[in-house]
Amino acid sequence: MTKTLILNGPNLNLLGQRQPEIYGAQTLADVEEACTALAADLDLGDVTCKQSNHEGALVDAIQDARGRQDAIVINPGAYSHTSIAILDALNAFDGKVVEVHISNIHQREAFRHHSHVSARADAVIAGLGTEGYLAALRWLARRG
Ligand code: DHK
């Protein structure tokens, strides 16, 4: 079983309302429900979903996952491009880390092209829309 934390950063609470042409029509609640349902189908293990607009709260959530979760699926939002603190927290986590970006950050503004988190991530998904979260869970389930 792979107990998994799905952690979303700033502004992802506005999914479905904010720039739907980029981030899609699904709300965060829709995404979290779909993840929970897929994890059950895949026999993956418990999924815990958290979102915060605050860098320190995201660091706290990652620290809290130490010894409790086997994997973290993280979309750090704009903190991907700025936060060494989130990278450091992930470096102190022993399980698998999958970084998800809903949009293809490489097709967007230059300041979105680099993610600090990618240095720690075991896998990076970008541009699959909100299906990226489901792809992350499928990958985790397959690797047992
Ligand atoms: C989400 C955000 O909020 C942006 O700040 C990132 C990411 C991209 C996404 O594609 O999910 O640059």
Image (spheres, helix red, strand yellow):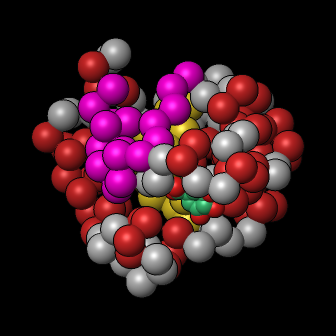
- Is residue 108 among what the camera can see? yes
Residues shaded magenta: 122-139
How many numbered badges does the structure rendering display? 0
- Is residue 73 among what the camera can see? no
* For residue 24, above or below residue 60: below
Q: Quadrant of the C terminus?
A: top left
* For residue 96, above or below residue 13: above
Q: Is residue 20 left or right of residue 10?
A: left
Where in the figure is residue 77, as x and y percent of width and height? 62, 58
Would you say residue 136 sits in the magenta stretch?
yes
Would you say residue 83 sits in the magenta stretch?
no
The image quarter containing residue 51 is: bottom right
Pick the residue in front: 128 or 26: 128
Q: Residue furthest left?
A: 41
* For residue 140, above or below residue 69: above
Identify the residue at horizontal 67%, vertical 43% (top origin): 113
In which of the image's four quarters is ligand 1 placed? bottom right
Identify the residue at horizontal 46%, vertical 77% (top origin): 19
Where in the figure is residue 59, as x and y percent of width and height? 76, 52
Pick the residue in front: 33 or 99: 99
Identify the residue at horizontal 76%, vertical 30% (top origin): 92
Where in the figure is residue 82, as x and y percent of width and height? 81, 52
